[in-house]
């Protein structure tokens, strides 16, 4: 069931109760968690917390805590599965679910108060009616009156019983026909509802709006909501139009909070400004040449993995009036005039170099005298801290590091995040370059695919979901920019990377083609059908079904089955 009044039916309801938070392992969830933690501490509400990476973690965390806690808050996990069926909880346990994954499981939507959804349904979400999906099976059997032919009676009585039997048989046939038609319609509605996976509004934004309604919002919470929105945009989880709508709303909040606060103390004050920025990775914390080369946007538009593209990059720098010596040193060490003119120079030359969309609206965070970070900088640093950490660090340690990092990035953690993010984008660029030069991006007819082999350079990075998603976007855009096939923009991409060397499994991700304006993903259902066709063992432990895990030995057969399904 949906909760209409979050202020009273969720936050007010939890007052004085002990709760358990189950937080998914992603940036939006961490931002949402930080806001919720602040609200809970303000009201002195006791809580425990567990990090959830997949469905198995979800089950384990519940089993270990269900005897002590009766109220669970799920952040970006649980919404897409039937919680009651998967966890089998006692009737007095209540789940509050704030999940941006879509579609929400219908059993959760029509749950009788045990599962309470904190996010409202989208305007374009066509949720099937209750009676179209759920139907009570009747155990009553029709009485077969006069079924015994041994009964003695007059001819009229026997004839009456026979007529009644015929009538009952006709009714039974009609009931069976009606049931079959209902089941066919149910299957059709379920398929139409669940055929695409996609993301709704970031959970951190909804939590910030709750804090606003409680009059407990502040700039730090606003920055967390901004970071969550930026993560969705950078990872291709929402459309550009929706990003612009949400960022306009957050801009209004930024103006309101700026007018409300007193920023007289420069060292501790936090300033959030709405500005236009460039689609370049960490360009204020890197050298200009490297940022231009390793950013997905400029790399794909200028084809910087080729000699021709490399020459074009140097031509662009020369036309901007940037000497090579300046472009190779850190941005903050460049001449002041060159730094000040860099943004305008890029914007002026953008049309000439096919970089028209390089400018986008975002927010910049400033605090103290020297700390300046754009929202995209923070997302890339967090992504690096979460998904490129050494193998010796557990997911819980990485999660706690990310919690400590927000909302004001600590200098040591920021430097570590920047360093790892630079390494990540260098590796991604070299991976894309190698894939194109070695012609490893293969066409299978209805889609193209790329396989990262075990033992490949830094392959373990790509076993993480968000890093693999970024690589997939990079490869698809690079392939389309190089391909002579006119239908290249209409081809989706499947990327596979090793998941567990010990278990011999690999992870498979599918992303929609570039011609699609919507990030809605149809691969979840296709993957299920392909696995069912070849009868391979699957471990679908992800809340986003566009990711799939199968044994490496079944990968070729799986791709063949997928080709047959999508052809």
Image (cartoon, helix red, strand yellow):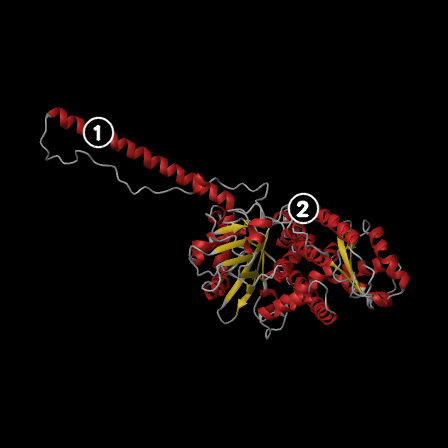
As drawn, the residue found furthest toward the front would be 16
Quarter-of-image position of residue 474: bottom right
Cα separation between marks 2 and 1: 63 Å
Q: Classify mark 1: residues with Cα within 10 Å, few (<14), some (14-19) or many (20+).
A: some
Q: Which element is circle 2 on? A: helix
Foreground of the two, 54 or 476: 54
Give the tally of numbered discs: 2
Side (left or right) of 28 relative to 220? left
Residue holding disc 1: 164
Residue 59 appearing in the image: yes
Q: SS at mark 1?
A: helix
Residue lying at the far left of the rendered structure: 152
Q: Which of 354 and 401 is in front in this view?
A: 401
Q: How many residues crowd mark 2 within 10 Å: few (<14), some (14–19), many (20+)?
A: few
Tell me, for residue 242, which label it has, or none.
2
Query: Residue 152's x, y, as percent?
Result: 9, 31
Percent x, y of residue 196:
54, 47
- Position of residue 246 measured from the top left corner of the image (x, y, whole percent): 69, 48
**Is 284 on the left-hand or right-hand side of 230?**
right
Residue drawn at x 10%, y 26% is 154
Side of 7 relative to 241 (left or right): left
Residue at 48% across, 69% down: 503
Mark 2 or mark 1, which has the lower sequence index? Answer: 1
Farthest residue to the top: give it.
Answer: 156
Question: Residue 302: x, y in percent?
Answer: 76, 56
**Which residue sits at x=80%, y=57%?**
262
Query: Residue extending furthest right?
Result: 337
């Amino acid at each position: 069931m949906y909760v209409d009044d979050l202020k009273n039916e969720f936050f007010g309801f939890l007052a004085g109760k002990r709760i358990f938070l189950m937080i998914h392992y992603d940036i939006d969830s961490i931002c949402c968690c930080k806001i919720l933690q602040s609200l809970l501490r303000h009201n002195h509400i006791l809580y425990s917390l567990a990090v959830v990476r997949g469905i198995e973690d979800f089950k384990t965390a519940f089993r270990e805590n269900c005897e002590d806690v009766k109220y669970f808050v799920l952040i970006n996990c649980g919404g897409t599965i039937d919680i009651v069926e998967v966890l089998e909880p006692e009737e007095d346990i209540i789940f509050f679910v704030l999940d941006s994954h879509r579609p929400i499981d219908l059993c959760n939507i029509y749950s009788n108060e045990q599962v309470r959804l904190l996010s409202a349904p989208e305007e374009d979400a066509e949720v099937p009616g209750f009676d179209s999906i759920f139907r009570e099976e009747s155990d009553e059997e029709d009485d077969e009156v006069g079924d015994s032919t041994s009964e003695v009676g007059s001819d009229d009585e026997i004839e009456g019983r026979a007529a009644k039997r015929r009538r009952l048989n006709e009714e039974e046939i009609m009931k069976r026909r009606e049931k079959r038609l209902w089941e066919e319609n149910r299957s059709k509605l379920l398929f139409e509802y669940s055929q695409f996976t996609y993301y709704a509004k970031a959970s951190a934004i909804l939590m910030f709006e709750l804090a606003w309604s409680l009059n407990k919002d502040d700039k730090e919470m606003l920055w967390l909501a901004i970071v969550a929105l930026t993560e969705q945009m950078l990872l291709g989880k929402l459309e550009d139009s929706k990003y612009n709508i949400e960022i306009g709303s957050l801009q209004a909040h930024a103006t309101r909070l700026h007018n409300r606060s007193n920023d007289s103390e420069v060292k501790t004050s936090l300033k959030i400004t709405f500005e236009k920025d460039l689609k370049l990775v960490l360009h204020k914390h890197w050298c200009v040449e490297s940022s231009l080369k390793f950013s997905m946007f400029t790399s794909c538009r200028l084809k910087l993995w080729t000699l021709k593209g490399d020459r074009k990059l140097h031509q662009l720098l020369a036309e901007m009036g940037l000497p090579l010596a300046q472009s190779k040193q850190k941005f903050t060490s460049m001449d002041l005039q060159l730094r000040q003119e860099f943004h305008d120079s890029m914007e002026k030359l953008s049309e000439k170099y096919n970089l028209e969309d390089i400018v986008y609206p975002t927010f910049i965070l400033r605090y103290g005298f020297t700390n300046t970070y754009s929202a995209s900088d923070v997302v890339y640093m967090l992504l690096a801290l979460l998904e490129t950490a050494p193998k010796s660090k557990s997911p819980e340690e990485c999660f706690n590091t990310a919690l400590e990092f927000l909302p004001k990035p600590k200098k040591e953690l920021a430097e570590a995040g920047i360093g790892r993010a630079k390494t990540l984008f260098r590796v991604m660029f070299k991976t894309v370059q190698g894939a194109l030069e070695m012609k490893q991006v293969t066409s299978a007819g209805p889609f193209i695919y790329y396989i990262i082999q075990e033992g490949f350079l830094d392959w373990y990075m790509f076993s993480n979901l968000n890093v693999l998603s970024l690589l997939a976007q990079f490869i698809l855009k690079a392939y389309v920019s190089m391909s002579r096939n006119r239908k290249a923009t209409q081809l989706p991409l499947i990327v596979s990377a090793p998941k567990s060397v010990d278990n011999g499994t690999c992870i498979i991700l599918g992303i929609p083609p570039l011609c699609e304006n919507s990030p809605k993903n149809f691969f979840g259902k296709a993957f299920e059908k392909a696995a069912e066709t070849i009868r391979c063992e699957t471990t679908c432990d992800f809340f986003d079904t566009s990711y799939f895990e199968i044994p490496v030995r079944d990968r070729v057969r799986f791709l063949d089955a997928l080709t047959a399904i999508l052809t």
